[in-house]
Amino acid sequence: MNKYVVILLVVLASCKKNNDVTSNGGNTIDTSSLTVAQFYEYNILPSTTNSSILLFNNPHEVCLDTRTTLKNKLFIFLPGTTGYPTAYKLIVKQAASQGYHAIGLMYPNDPSIYTASNNDTTNTQFAKCRQEIFDGTDQTSGVSVDTNNCIKNRLYKLLLYLQRTYPAQNWSQYISNGQVVWSKCIIAGHSQGGGHAFFIAKRVLVDKAISFSSIDWNSALNRSATWVTQSGATSINKFYSINGTNDEIFNYANVQTQLMDMSIPGSPVSVDNNTSPYSSTHRLITSATPAISIAPFPNHNLTCLDMSIPKTSTGAVIPAFVNAWNYLLNN
């Protein structure tokens, strides 16, 4: 994906005023009592949770809504290439409104692993890149991520920080014996992040995996990356996706071929003119018009990037997308 497009979107999104939190040295803090039923939002620098995390230090987005019945499950959202969690506030807040402890996680997401993997004739580079970004083990020269900066460590250190700082909010239920309790997690993401969500669900048992506008398609071989068709720790019945039919980066036909390669249940069902439960499919699609048509990839971002999500005349997310998100989260 064109990194300058995403950076522009992130800058615009970060300019939005946030009335739910207050700022303190780059971190946001909640000044109200933890016992009050309300919506909580925190922006926490990764370096605040662990002094060894120095790169990709844009703040994590953390939300909790105690006005609703909590599900005691953790929603984790991974941004696309060069993206920041604060550019995906709407999907994280929606998860919180549904009773999830919700996190938009900042992680090493530049360079694009598609650049490093797309023409690999061994068809193993996608998996190597994703494995290194996930756990920090040295797999390839295509990316450079150590154990301090990997997704696993960043999430674990953030949960430790939240446990210490807001003990009444019960973030501690998601860590045990020095590890993330992945079985209580819904892992989701956009573009590069969506691929990580599916890959992680293949490596560890999670509650659910949701991919927004993402595939690992090897153009040189014209087929899915090898890891896509391999068996994994999480049942394929726990995998869900939503993709745009007009996505400029991922060819729609290739997307559907890959989802079939994975044996993800159901057929493509449009959220534009159908309602939940969408024939119980795990493969949602949309042909909606993005809110902002920033060239060259507006349709790639419309499924979840704040600035691109279709809006009503009042600026709210269109009901079709709210319904689709809730289905993906709760079905």
Image (cartoon, rainbow, N blue to C red):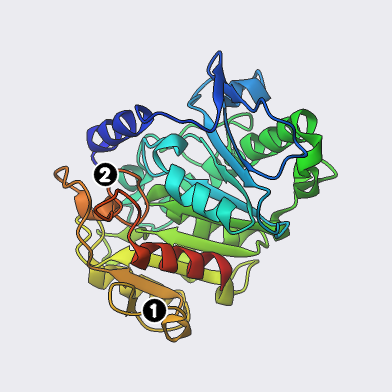
Q: Nearer the viewer, residue 10 or 232?
A: 10
Q: Which residue is mark 2?
A: 1
Residue type at numbered disc 2: Met
Q: In terms of image quadrants, where is residue 220?
A: bottom left
Q: Which residue is mark 1?
A: 275
Residue at 22% over, 55% down: 299
Q: Is residue 105 left or right of residue 123?
A: right
**Dot 2 crowding, Cα within 10 Å, few <14, some 14–19, many 20+:** many
Residue at 67% over, 23% down: 50
Q: Is residue 60 left or right of residue 301?
A: right
Q: Nearer the viewer, residue 255 or 184?
A: 184
Quadrant position of the C terminus in the picture: bottom right
Q: Is residue 125 left or right of residue 167?
A: left
Q: In terms of image quadrants, where is residue 70?
A: bottom right
Residue type at numbered disc 1: Thr
Counting from the top left corner in percent of width and height, residue 292 is at: 20, 46
Counting from the top left corner in percent of width and height, residue 166 is at: 75, 33
Residue at 34% over, 58% down: 213
